[in-house]
Image (cartoon, rainbow, N blue to C red):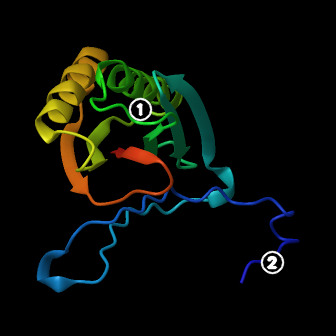
Amino acid sequence: VEDSEAYHDVAAVCGLLAVVVISHLPRDAAIEWHVVAVVDDPLQRKHFAMKMLSEGFQIECEAVQSSSASCASISAHLSLISPSAPQLDLDGPLHDLVAVFRQAVEKLSEDCSASPLSFRAFFKEDVFDAETLQTGLQEYLEKYLGKKTPALILVPVVDLPGKEVIHTTCWLS
């Protein structure tokens, strides 16, 4: 139980949450959680968010940095804002998604020496071709992050919240 007087009614910045739906989990599990935790003062964490439009898509990105500036997490997602065309041209939106991710990494790097470790991309399997997505994301990650390019992990999903078609998460340490 938190005492609001002790925290002066300041809300702590919690970590980022990604919820995805897949067709089945190993061992017929009903739910799977991946938790990354850090011991710090939640009231001293830094948080920022960015949004941009990109060729019929909206990109939203948010980041949380630990109070010690030793680690951080970035979450970015691509959502459809216009009716889908028969063939979605992903080049521009993937470029912009990685550019926004790079901006978040640079902003965190101002006072945090953490490097991106893995770039996990959950994508709606009925919307995108995995090979095209893999090639495009890898190319832009290498172009924008060079030696700091994180490992790319693609996870096909059945559903994502709202109109999201791609949801990425990245842990920096």
Q: Position of residue 152 (x, y in %)?
A: 20, 39
Query: Which of these two is toward me, 104 or 39?
Result: 104
Query: Which of these two is toward me, 161 or 143?
Result: 161
Image point (51%, 42%), residue name? 69
| Figure quadrant of residue 142 | top left
Q: Position of residue 21 (x, y in %)?
A: 33, 66
Does residue 157 lie above or below 3 as drawn?
Answer: above
What is the crowding at mark 2: few (fewer than 14 residues within 10 Å), some, or many (at least 20)? few
Q: Position of residue 71 (x, y in %)?
A: 43, 46
The answer to whether any part of residue 143 appears in the image is yes
Label disc, if present, on residue 113 of the rendered structure: 1
Which residue is identified by label 2? 3
Disc nearest the viewer among 2 and 1: 2
Query: Which of these two is toward me, 120 or 14?
Result: 120
For the N terminus, the image quarter is: bottom right
| Figure quadrant of residue 3 | bottom right
Residue type marked 1: Ser
Image point (62%, 59%), residue name? 42
Secondary structure under the numbered disc 1 in the rendered image: loop
